[in-house]
Protein backbone atom coordinates (compact mmCIF):
# COMPACT_ATOMS: atom_id res chain seq x y z
CA UNK A 1 0.00 0.00 0.00
CA UNK A 2 0.93 3.66 -0.36
CA UNK A 3 1.16 5.82 2.74
CA UNK A 4 2.25 9.41 3.25
CA UNK A 5 5.65 9.53 4.94
CA UNK A 6 6.13 12.62 7.10
CA UNK A 7 9.87 12.03 6.76
CA UNK A 8 10.41 13.44 3.28
CA UNK A 9 6.81 14.63 2.91
CA UNK A 10 5.74 12.26 0.11
CA UNK A 11 3.46 9.31 -0.46
CA UNK A 12 5.61 6.17 -0.49
CA UNK A 13 5.12 2.43 -0.62
CA UNK A 14 4.92 0.98 2.87
CA UNK A 15 6.66 -2.37 3.07
CA UNK A 16 8.70 -4.41 5.52
CA UNK A 17 12.45 -4.12 5.02
CA UNK A 18 14.97 -6.72 6.18
CA UNK A 19 12.43 -8.96 7.96
CA UNK A 20 9.41 -10.98 6.88
CA UNK A 21 7.17 -9.07 9.28
CA UNK A 22 6.39 -5.38 9.33
CA UNK A 23 7.77 -3.74 12.45
CA UNK A 24 5.62 -0.90 13.67
CA UNK A 25 5.58 1.35 16.74
CA UNK A 26 2.99 3.77 18.05
CA UNK A 27 3.40 6.21 20.91
CA UNK A 28 0.79 5.04 23.37
CA UNK A 29 -1.22 6.92 25.95
CA UNK A 30 0.10 8.81 28.92
CA UNK A 31 -1.98 7.16 31.60
CA UNK A 32 -2.66 10.11 33.89
CA UNK A 33 -6.40 10.39 33.16
CA UNK A 34 -9.12 8.94 30.91
CA UNK A 35 -8.31 9.29 27.22
CA UNK A 36 -10.51 11.64 25.19
CA UNK A 37 -11.92 10.80 21.77
CA UNK A 38 -9.20 12.93 20.12
CA UNK A 39 -6.61 10.52 21.52
CA UNK A 40 -8.73 7.65 20.27
CA UNK A 41 -8.98 9.15 16.80
CA UNK A 42 -5.24 8.54 16.53
CA UNK A 43 -5.38 5.00 17.93
CA UNK A 44 -8.38 4.17 15.74
CA UNK A 45 -6.60 5.14 12.52
CA UNK A 46 -3.60 3.08 13.57
CA UNK A 47 -6.05 0.21 14.13
CA UNK A 48 -7.50 0.72 10.65
CA UNK A 49 -4.00 0.58 9.20
CA UNK A 50 -3.14 -2.59 11.10
CA UNK A 51 -6.36 -4.31 10.10
CA UNK A 52 -5.91 -3.37 6.45
CA UNK A 53 -2.27 -4.50 6.37
CA UNK A 54 -3.32 -7.84 7.83
CA UNK A 55 -6.02 -8.12 5.22
CA UNK A 56 -3.33 -7.58 2.60
CA UNK A 57 -1.42 -10.55 4.04
CA UNK A 58 1.24 -8.56 5.92
CA UNK A 59 2.44 -10.04 9.23
CA UNK A 60 2.81 -7.35 11.83
CA UNK A 61 4.84 -6.88 14.93
CA UNK A 62 3.18 -3.88 16.50
CA UNK A 63 4.50 -2.32 19.68
CA UNK A 64 2.65 0.32 21.62
CA UNK A 65 4.08 1.82 24.76
CA UNK A 66 2.32 2.97 27.87
CA UNK A 67 3.84 6.16 29.20
CA UNK A 68 3.47 5.42 32.88
CA UNK A 69 5.95 7.97 34.15
CA UNK A 70 6.19 11.64 33.04
CA UNK A 71 5.75 15.15 34.42
CA UNK A 72 1.95 15.03 34.50
CA UNK A 73 1.82 11.61 36.15
CA UNK A 74 4.29 12.64 38.84
CA UNK A 75 2.32 15.82 39.49
CA UNK A 76 -1.09 14.13 39.64
CA UNK A 77 0.07 11.09 41.62
CA UNK A 78 1.65 13.25 44.28
CA UNK A 79 -1.45 15.47 44.44
CA UNK A 80 -3.53 12.31 44.98
CA UNK A 81 -1.05 11.03 47.59
CA UNK A 82 -0.45 7.83 45.60
CA UNK A 83 2.61 6.11 44.22
CA UNK A 84 2.91 6.17 40.45
CA UNK A 85 1.91 2.55 39.81
CA UNK A 86 -1.27 2.82 41.90
CA UNK A 87 -2.16 6.06 40.19
CA UNK A 88 -1.57 4.91 36.59
CA UNK A 89 -3.03 1.38 36.98
CA UNK A 90 -6.59 2.65 37.01
CA UNK A 91 -6.14 4.72 33.83
CA UNK A 92 -4.28 2.03 31.96
CA UNK A 93 -7.12 -0.39 32.67
CA UNK A 94 -9.62 2.22 31.51
CA UNK A 95 -7.59 2.84 28.35
CA UNK A 96 -7.76 -0.82 27.32
CA UNK A 97 -11.45 -1.06 28.22
CA UNK A 98 -12.15 1.96 26.02
CA UNK A 99 -9.94 0.58 23.23
CA UNK A 100 -11.81 -2.73 23.34
CA UNK A 101 -15.15 -0.94 23.30
CA UNK A 102 -14.05 0.97 20.22
CA UNK A 103 -12.97 -2.23 18.50
CA UNK A 104 -9.24 -1.43 18.60
CA UNK A 105 -7.21 -4.62 18.38
CA UNK A 106 -4.67 -5.18 21.13
CA UNK A 107 -1.02 -4.63 20.13
CA UNK A 108 1.28 -7.63 19.75
CA UNK A 109 3.48 -6.04 22.42
CA UNK A 110 2.59 -3.48 25.09
CA UNK A 111 5.71 -1.88 26.57
CA UNK A 112 5.61 -0.06 29.90
CA UNK A 113 8.10 2.75 30.36
CA UNK A 114 8.68 1.85 34.00
CA UNK A 115 9.65 -1.71 32.98
CA UNK A 116 12.32 -0.50 30.57
CA UNK A 117 14.35 1.90 32.75
CA UNK A 118 17.62 -0.10 32.35
CA UNK A 119 17.26 0.12 28.55
CA UNK A 120 16.85 3.89 28.80
CA UNK A 121 19.87 4.20 31.07
CA UNK A 122 21.99 2.13 28.65
CA UNK A 123 20.93 4.33 25.75
CA UNK A 124 21.81 7.51 27.63
CA UNK A 125 25.18 6.01 28.57
CA UNK A 126 25.88 5.32 24.90
CA UNK A 127 25.19 8.97 24.16
CA UNK A 128 27.31 10.08 27.12
CA UNK A 129 30.29 8.09 25.78
CA UNK A 130 30.19 10.32 22.70
CA UNK A 131 29.66 13.44 24.78
CA UNK A 132 26.26 13.89 23.12
CA UNK A 133 24.61 13.46 26.51
CA UNK A 134 25.96 15.68 29.28
CA UNK A 135 25.18 16.15 32.92
CA UNK A 136 24.06 19.52 34.28
CA UNK A 137 24.90 20.88 37.74
CA UNK A 138 21.69 19.53 39.28
CA UNK A 139 22.52 15.97 38.15
CA UNK A 140 20.07 15.85 35.21
CA UNK A 141 21.27 14.64 31.81
CA UNK A 142 20.62 16.50 28.57
CA UNK A 143 20.90 15.81 24.86
CA UNK A 144 23.20 18.22 23.00
CA UNK A 145 21.20 18.86 19.85
CA UNK A 146 23.99 20.83 18.17
CA UNK A 147 25.71 17.45 17.79
CA UNK A 148 22.94 16.01 15.62
CA UNK A 149 23.12 17.65 12.20
CA UNK A 150 19.82 16.12 11.07
CA UNK A 151 17.83 17.84 13.83
CA UNK A 152 14.61 19.14 12.27
CA UNK A 153 14.50 16.71 9.33
CA UNK A 154 11.15 15.19 10.31
CA UNK A 155 9.24 18.38 11.07
CA UNK A 156 11.24 20.19 8.38
CA UNK A 157 12.04 23.04 10.67
CA UNK A 158 15.21 25.01 10.17
CA UNK A 159 17.13 25.22 13.41
CA UNK A 160 20.12 27.13 12.01
CA UNK A 161 21.89 29.10 14.68
CA UNK A 162 20.38 27.29 17.64
CA UNK A 163 21.97 28.27 20.86
CA UNK A 164 24.23 25.45 22.00
CA UNK A 165 23.54 24.55 25.60
CA UNK A 166 20.16 26.29 25.99
CA UNK A 167 18.14 23.75 27.93
CA UNK A 168 14.58 22.72 28.61
CA UNK A 169 13.60 20.21 31.25
CA UNK A 170 9.84 19.84 30.81
CA UNK A 171 8.49 16.96 28.71
CA UNK A 172 6.34 19.15 26.49
CA UNK A 173 7.45 22.56 25.34
CA UNK A 174 6.57 25.30 22.92
CA UNK A 175 6.89 24.72 19.21
CA UNK A 176 9.88 26.08 17.31
CA UNK A 177 12.06 26.11 20.37
CA UNK A 178 15.04 23.87 19.72
CA UNK A 179 16.69 23.27 23.06
CA UNK A 180 18.84 20.62 24.63
CA UNK A 181 16.21 18.41 26.17
CA UNK A 182 16.25 16.30 29.31
CA UNK A 183 17.17 12.63 28.94
CA UNK A 184 17.23 11.96 32.64
CA UNK A 185 15.83 14.19 35.35
CA UNK A 186 17.52 14.26 38.72
CA UNK A 187 15.01 13.49 41.45
CA UNK A 188 13.39 16.32 43.32
CA UNK A 189 12.29 15.91 46.95
CA UNK A 190 9.12 13.83 47.27
CA UNK A 191 9.26 12.48 43.68
CA UNK A 192 9.46 8.80 42.87
CA UNK A 193 12.87 8.00 41.43
CA UNK A 194 15.12 5.18 40.22
CA UNK A 195 18.64 4.80 41.55
CA UNK A 196 20.83 4.09 38.51
CA UNK A 197 24.37 4.64 37.18
CA UNK A 198 23.15 8.03 35.97
CA UNK A 199 22.19 9.05 39.49
CA UNK A 200 18.89 9.09 41.27
CA UNK A 201 16.12 10.24 38.98
CA UNK A 202 13.68 9.35 36.25
CA UNK A 203 13.70 9.24 32.46
CA UNK A 204 12.58 12.07 30.19
CA UNK A 205 9.61 11.30 27.96
CA UNK A 206 11.52 11.22 24.66
CA UNK A 207 14.13 8.65 25.69
CA UNK A 208 11.34 6.31 26.79
CA UNK A 209 10.11 5.77 23.24
CA UNK A 210 13.59 5.52 21.68
CA UNK A 211 14.56 2.82 24.17
CA UNK A 212 11.32 0.85 23.93
CA UNK A 213 11.09 0.93 20.13
CA UNK A 214 14.69 -0.28 19.80
CA UNK A 215 14.32 -2.91 22.50
CA UNK A 216 11.41 -4.64 20.77
CA UNK A 217 11.89 -3.75 17.10
CA UNK A 218 15.64 -3.24 16.63
CA UNK A 219 17.71 -0.17 15.73
CA UNK A 220 15.90 0.33 12.42
CA UNK A 221 12.28 -0.53 11.78
CA UNK A 222 9.50 0.10 9.29
CA UNK A 223 6.87 2.47 10.67
CA UNK A 224 6.40 4.86 13.57
CA UNK A 225 2.98 6.41 14.29
CA UNK A 226 1.43 9.02 16.53
CA UNK A 227 -0.75 12.12 16.56
CA UNK A 228 0.40 15.23 14.68
CA UNK A 229 1.43 17.05 17.86
CA UNK A 230 4.13 14.47 18.49
CA UNK A 231 6.07 15.31 15.33
CA UNK A 232 7.92 18.06 17.16
CA UNK A 233 9.62 17.88 19.57
CA UNK A 234 8.87 14.29 20.61
CA UNK A 235 9.55 12.41 17.38
CA UNK A 236 12.32 14.76 16.30
CA UNK A 237 14.00 14.02 19.63
CA UNK A 238 13.47 10.27 19.28
CA UNK A 239 15.26 10.37 15.92
CA UNK A 240 18.12 12.47 17.32
CA UNK A 241 18.66 10.16 20.30
CA UNK A 242 18.37 6.89 18.41
CA UNK A 243 20.35 7.78 15.33
CA UNK A 244 23.11 9.40 17.39
CA UNK A 245 23.38 6.26 19.53
CA UNK A 246 23.24 3.64 16.78
CA UNK A 247 24.49 5.40 13.65
CA UNK A 248 21.58 3.83 11.73
CA UNK A 249 18.32 5.28 10.44
CA UNK A 250 15.60 4.90 13.09
CA UNK A 251 12.08 4.49 11.62
CA UNK A 252 11.89 4.55 7.81
CA UNK A 253 8.28 5.63 7.60
CA UNK A 254 6.40 8.09 9.85
CA UNK A 255 2.64 8.37 10.00
CA UNK A 256 0.97 11.27 11.82
CA UNK A 257 -2.76 11.40 12.45
CA UNK A 258 -4.16 14.92 12.32
CA UNK A 259 -6.20 16.40 15.14
CA UNK A 260 -9.77 15.98 16.15
CA UNK A 261 -11.10 19.51 16.57
CA UNK A 262 -13.99 21.05 18.44
CA UNK A 263 -15.21 24.31 16.92
CA UNK A 264 -11.94 24.65 15.06
CA UNK A 265 -9.72 24.09 18.09
CA UNK A 266 -7.76 20.98 19.02
CA UNK A 267 -9.68 18.72 21.38
CA UNK A 268 -7.48 18.62 24.46
CA UNK A 269 -7.46 18.38 28.21
CA UNK A 270 -5.85 21.78 28.58
CA UNK A 271 -8.49 23.52 26.40
CA UNK A 272 -11.21 21.81 28.43
CA UNK A 273 -13.14 21.07 25.20
CA UNK A 274 -12.94 17.31 25.31
CA UNK A 275 -15.23 14.30 25.55
CA UNK A 276 -14.16 10.91 26.77
CA UNK A 277 -15.73 7.78 25.34
CA UNK A 278 -17.53 7.34 28.66
CA UNK A 279 -19.00 10.85 28.51
CA UNK A 280 -20.55 10.02 25.14
CA UNK A 281 -21.77 6.58 26.18
CA UNK A 282 -23.53 8.12 29.16
CA UNK A 283 -25.20 10.60 26.84
CA UNK A 284 -26.65 7.62 24.99
CA UNK A 285 -24.37 7.47 21.93
CA UNK A 286 -23.21 4.08 20.75
CA UNK A 287 -19.61 2.89 20.78
CA UNK A 288 -19.90 1.63 17.20
CA UNK A 289 -21.13 5.03 15.97
CA UNK A 290 -18.21 6.75 17.69
CA UNK A 291 -15.74 4.35 16.05
CA UNK A 292 -17.36 4.78 12.66
CA UNK A 293 -17.39 8.57 12.92
CA UNK A 294 -13.78 8.87 14.04
CA UNK A 295 -12.43 6.66 11.25
CA UNK A 296 -14.62 7.98 8.44
CA UNK A 297 -12.61 11.15 7.87
CA UNK A 298 -9.19 10.18 6.45
CA UNK A 299 -6.32 10.47 8.91
CA UNK A 300 -4.51 13.18 6.97
CA UNK A 301 -7.39 15.62 7.37
CA UNK A 302 -8.24 17.36 10.58
CA UNK A 303 -11.76 16.54 11.62
CA UNK A 304 -14.36 18.60 13.41
CA UNK A 305 -16.39 16.78 16.04
CA UNK A 306 -20.12 17.54 16.16
CA UNK A 307 -23.09 15.73 17.69
CA UNK A 308 -24.87 16.06 14.39
CA UNK A 309 -22.19 14.00 12.67
CA UNK A 310 -22.39 11.46 15.47
CA UNK A 311 -26.10 11.03 14.81
CA UNK A 312 -25.44 10.65 11.08
CA UNK A 313 -22.91 7.98 11.91
CA UNK A 314 -25.49 6.19 14.07
CA UNK A 315 -27.95 6.23 11.17
CA UNK A 316 -25.31 4.98 8.75
CA UNK A 317 -24.59 2.02 11.01
CA UNK A 318 -28.29 1.22 11.29
CA UNK A 319 -28.56 1.25 7.52
CA UNK A 320 -25.57 -1.05 7.19
CA UNK A 321 -26.73 -3.49 9.87
CA UNK A 322 -30.27 -3.65 8.50
CA UNK A 323 -28.88 -4.36 5.05
CA UNK A 324 -26.56 -7.05 6.44
CA UNK A 325 -29.51 -8.71 8.21
CA UNK A 326 -31.52 -8.57 5.02
CA UNK A 327 -28.74 -10.36 3.12
CA UNK A 328 -28.29 -12.95 5.89
CA UNK A 329 -31.99 -13.66 6.00
CA UNK A 330 -31.86 -14.60 2.31
CA UNK A 331 -34.93 -16.03 0.62
CA UNK A 332 -33.90 -14.65 -2.78
CA UNK A 333 -34.39 -16.71 -5.95
CA UNK A 334 -31.48 -18.82 -7.23
CA UNK A 335 -29.20 -17.45 -9.90
CA UNK A 336 -26.98 -14.42 -10.41
CA UNK A 337 -27.79 -10.98 -11.69
CA UNK A 338 -24.78 -10.10 -13.87
CA UNK A 339 -25.15 -6.36 -13.58
CA UNK A 340 -25.26 -6.48 -9.80
CA UNK A 341 -22.32 -8.91 -9.77
CA UNK A 342 -20.31 -6.30 -11.69
CA UNK A 343 -21.39 -3.57 -9.23
CA UNK A 344 -20.32 -5.79 -6.33
CA UNK A 345 -16.90 -6.41 -7.88
CA UNK A 346 -16.51 -2.68 -8.48
CA UNK A 347 -17.38 -1.93 -4.85
CA UNK A 348 -14.76 -4.42 -3.66
CA UNK A 349 -12.11 -2.92 -5.92
CA UNK A 350 -13.08 0.59 -4.85
CA UNK A 351 -12.83 -0.38 -1.21
CA UNK A 352 -9.38 -1.98 -1.51
CA UNK A 353 -7.95 0.66 -3.83
CA UNK A 354 -9.12 3.48 -1.53
CA UNK A 355 -7.49 2.03 1.57
CA UNK A 356 -4.33 1.17 -0.37
CA UNK A 357 -4.22 4.82 -1.43
CA UNK A 358 -2.97 6.44 1.77
CA UNK A 359 -5.75 4.89 3.82
CA UNK A 360 -8.62 6.82 2.28
CA UNK A 361 -11.34 5.62 4.63
CA UNK A 362 -13.94 8.07 3.30
CA UNK A 363 -13.74 6.66 -0.22
CA UNK A 364 -13.65 3.06 1.04
CA UNK A 365 -16.80 3.70 3.01
CA UNK A 366 -18.49 5.43 0.07
CA UNK A 367 -17.76 2.44 -2.19
CA UNK A 368 -19.56 0.12 0.22
CA UNK A 369 -22.53 2.41 0.78
CA UNK A 370 -22.98 2.68 -2.95
CA UNK A 371 -23.23 -1.12 -3.04
CA UNK A 372 -25.75 -1.08 -0.18
CA UNK A 373 -27.89 1.40 -2.06
CA UNK A 374 -27.81 -0.51 -5.35
CA UNK A 375 -28.37 -3.91 -3.76
CA UNK A 376 -31.28 -2.64 -1.65
CA UNK A 377 -32.95 -1.26 -4.78
CA UNK A 378 -32.36 -4.57 -6.57
CA UNK A 379 -33.87 -6.46 -3.64
CA UNK A 380 -36.90 -4.12 -3.66
CA UNK A 381 -37.28 -4.55 -7.42
CA UNK A 382 -36.99 -8.33 -7.14
CA UNK A 383 -33.83 -8.64 -9.28
CA UNK A 384 -31.46 -9.66 -6.47
CA UNK A 385 -30.45 -13.33 -6.69
CA UNK A 386 -29.02 -15.76 -4.15
CA UNK A 387 -25.69 -15.80 -6.05
CA UNK A 388 -25.39 -12.04 -5.57
CA UNK A 389 -26.04 -12.36 -1.87
CA UNK A 390 -23.01 -14.61 -1.43
CA UNK A 391 -20.78 -12.09 -3.18
CA UNK A 392 -22.24 -9.14 -1.30
CA UNK A 393 -21.80 -10.85 2.07
CA UNK A 394 -18.16 -11.53 1.22
CA UNK A 395 -17.54 -7.86 0.39
CA UNK A 396 -19.33 -6.76 3.58
CA UNK A 397 -17.07 -9.09 5.56
CA UNK A 398 -14.01 -7.60 3.95
CA UNK A 399 -15.20 -4.09 4.77
CA UNK A 400 -16.05 -5.08 8.30
CA UNK A 401 -12.60 -6.65 8.79
CA UNK A 402 -11.33 -3.06 8.86
CA UNK A 403 -14.31 -0.91 9.84
CA UNK A 404 -15.56 -3.41 12.45
CA UNK A 405 -19.06 -2.05 13.08
CA UNK A 406 -21.44 -4.82 12.02
CA UNK A 407 -21.36 -6.83 15.22
CA UNK A 408 -23.71 -5.19 17.69
CA UNK A 409 -22.09 -5.04 21.16
CA UNK A 410 -23.42 -1.57 21.78
CA UNK A 411 -25.94 -2.29 24.50
CA UNK A 412 -23.43 -4.39 26.42
CA UNK A 413 -20.80 -1.64 26.22
CA UNK A 414 -23.29 0.96 27.39
CA UNK A 415 -24.29 -1.26 30.30
CA UNK A 416 -20.62 -1.51 31.35
CA UNK A 417 -20.34 2.28 31.13
CA UNK A 418 -23.38 2.61 33.39
CA UNK A 419 -21.91 0.16 35.88
CA UNK A 420 -18.70 2.20 35.90
CA UNK A 421 -20.66 5.45 36.35
CA UNK A 422 -22.46 3.94 39.31
CA UNK A 423 -19.16 2.97 40.93
CA UNK A 424 -17.71 6.43 40.34
CA UNK A 425 -20.82 8.21 41.61
CA UNK A 426 -21.49 9.66 38.15
CA UNK A 427 -24.79 7.99 37.33
CA UNK A 428 -26.52 11.38 37.40
CA UNK A 429 -24.70 12.20 34.14
CA UNK A 430 -26.46 9.39 32.31
CA UNK A 431 -29.24 10.34 29.89
CA UNK A 432 -32.65 9.59 31.47
CA UNK A 433 -33.87 7.64 28.45
CA UNK A 434 -30.76 5.50 28.67
CA UNK A 435 -31.45 4.57 32.26
CA UNK A 436 -35.05 3.79 31.37
CA UNK A 437 -34.05 1.79 28.33
CA UNK A 438 -31.53 -0.27 30.15
CA UNK A 439 -33.72 -0.87 33.14
CA UNK A 440 -35.21 -3.88 31.33
CA UNK A 441 -33.05 -6.92 30.73
CA UNK A 442 -33.47 -9.03 27.61
CA UNK A 443 -35.23 -11.72 29.63
CA UNK A 444 -37.67 -9.18 31.07
CA UNK A 445 -38.47 -7.91 27.59
CA UNK A 446 -39.00 -11.46 26.30
CA UNK A 447 -41.36 -12.05 29.23
CA UNK A 448 -43.42 -8.96 28.40
CA UNK A 449 -43.50 -9.77 24.70
CA UNK A 450 -44.80 -13.28 25.45
CA UNK A 451 -47.37 -11.92 27.87
CA UNK A 452 -48.56 -9.50 25.20
CA UNK A 453 -48.93 -12.30 22.62
CA UNK A 454 -50.95 -14.34 25.10
CA UNK A 455 -53.11 -11.31 25.96
CA UNK A 456 -53.84 -10.83 22.27
CA UNK A 457 -54.77 -14.48 21.85
CA UNK A 458 -57.13 -14.13 24.80
CA UNK A 459 -58.54 -11.03 23.05
CA UNK A 460 -57.44 -8.89 26.01
CA UNK A 461 -56.41 -6.03 23.73
CA UNK A 462 -56.26 -3.45 26.51
CA UNK A 463 -53.54 -5.42 28.29
CA UNK A 464 -51.70 -6.09 25.02
CA UNK A 465 -51.65 -2.38 24.18
CA UNK A 466 -50.56 -1.44 27.70
CA UNK A 467 -47.55 -3.74 27.42
CA UNK A 468 -46.71 -2.40 24.00
CA UNK A 469 -46.79 1.19 25.30
CA UNK A 470 -44.64 0.32 28.27
CA UNK A 471 -42.04 -1.20 25.97
CA UNK A 472 -42.09 1.80 23.64
CA UNK A 473 -41.64 4.14 26.59
CA UNK A 474 -38.52 2.19 27.49
CA UNK A 475 -37.15 2.47 23.98
CA UNK A 476 -38.08 -1.02 22.83
CA UNK A 477 -39.74 -1.38 19.47
CA UNK A 478 -41.84 -4.42 18.66
CA UNK A 479 -42.84 -5.53 15.23
CA UNK A 480 -45.51 -8.06 14.41
CA UNK A 481 -44.70 -10.10 11.34
CA UNK A 482 -45.76 -13.32 9.69
CA UNK A 483 -42.96 -15.16 11.49
CA UNK A 484 -43.99 -13.90 14.92
CA UNK A 485 -43.09 -10.95 17.08
CA UNK A 486 -39.65 -9.33 16.95
CA UNK A 487 -38.30 -6.65 19.25
CA UNK A 488 -35.28 -4.40 19.25
CA UNK A 489 -33.91 -1.59 21.32
CA UNK A 490 -34.29 1.81 19.66
P1 LIG B 1 -1.30 11.39 25.16
O1 LIG B 1 -2.05 10.40 25.99
O2 LIG B 1 -1.56 12.80 25.51
O3 LIG B 1 0.19 11.08 25.13
O4 LIG B 1 -1.83 11.25 23.65
C1 LIG B 1 -2.06 10.02 23.04
C2 LIG B 1 -2.16 10.20 21.54
O5 LIG B 1 -3.28 11.00 21.17
C3 LIG B 1 -0.95 10.89 20.90
O6 LIG B 1 -0.59 10.19 19.71
C4 LIG B 1 -1.45 12.27 20.58
O7 LIG B 1 -0.75 12.83 19.51
C5 LIG B 1 -2.89 11.99 20.22
N1 LIG B 1 -3.79 13.16 20.34
C6 LIG B 1 -3.91 14.04 21.36
N2 LIG B 1 -4.89 14.95 21.12
C7 LIG B 1 -5.43 14.63 19.91
C8 LIG B 1 -6.49 15.17 19.10
N3 LIG B 1 -7.21 16.23 19.48
N4 LIG B 1 -6.76 14.56 17.92
C9 LIG B 1 -6.05 13.48 17.51
N5 LIG B 1 -5.05 12.91 18.24
C10 LIG B 1 -4.73 13.48 19.41
ZN1 LIG C 1 6.59 8.33 21.91
Image: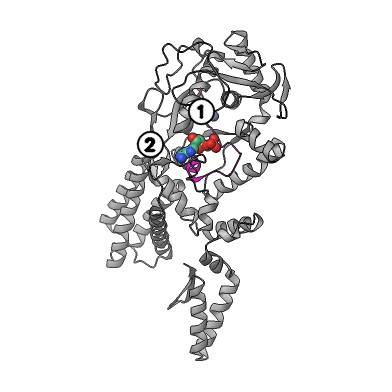
- Mark 1: few/some/many CA within 10 Å (<14, 14-19, 20+): few
Which quadrant does ligand 2 occupy?
A: top right
Give the percent coordinates (x, y) of residue 374.
Answer: 29, 58
| Residue 404 seen in render | no
Kindly identify the residue that appears in the image at 36 percent across and 62 percent down: 386
In the picture, the disc for residue 300 is 2
Which residue is pictured at 53% across the width and 53% down the height? Answer: 279
Residue 260 position, x and y percent, is 43, 42
Residue 40 position within the rendered picture, expressed as x and y whole percent measured from the top left: 50, 43
Quadrant in the picture for the N terminus: top left
Q: Residue at x 55, y 52 (%)?
A: 278
Residue 27 on the magenta segment = yes
In the rendered image, which residue does mark 1 sit on? 20
- Quadrant of residue 440 within the rendered picture: bottom right
User: Start and end of the magenta stretch?
Assistant: 15-40
Q: How many marks?
A: 2
Would residue 123 be visible to someone looking at this image? yes
Q: Earlier in the sequence, mark 1 or mark 2?
A: 1
Task: Note whether 339 is above or below 248 in the view shown.
Answer: below
Considering every residue shown, the one lying at the far bottom of the view is 459
Amino acid sequence: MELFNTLGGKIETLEPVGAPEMRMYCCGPTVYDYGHIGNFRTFLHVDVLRRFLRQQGVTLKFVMNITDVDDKIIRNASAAGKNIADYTGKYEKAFFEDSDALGILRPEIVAHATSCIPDMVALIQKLAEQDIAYQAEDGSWYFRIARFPGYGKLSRKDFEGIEDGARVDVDEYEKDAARDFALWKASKPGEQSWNTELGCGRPGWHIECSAMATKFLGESFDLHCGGEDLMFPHHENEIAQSESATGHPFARHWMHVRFLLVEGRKMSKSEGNFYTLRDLLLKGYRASAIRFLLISVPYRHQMNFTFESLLESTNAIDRLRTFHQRMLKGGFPEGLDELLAATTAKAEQGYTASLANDLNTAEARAAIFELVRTANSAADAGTLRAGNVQQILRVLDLFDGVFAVLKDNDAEITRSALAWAEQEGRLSEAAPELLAKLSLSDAEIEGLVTERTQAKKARNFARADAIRNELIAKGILIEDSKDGVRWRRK
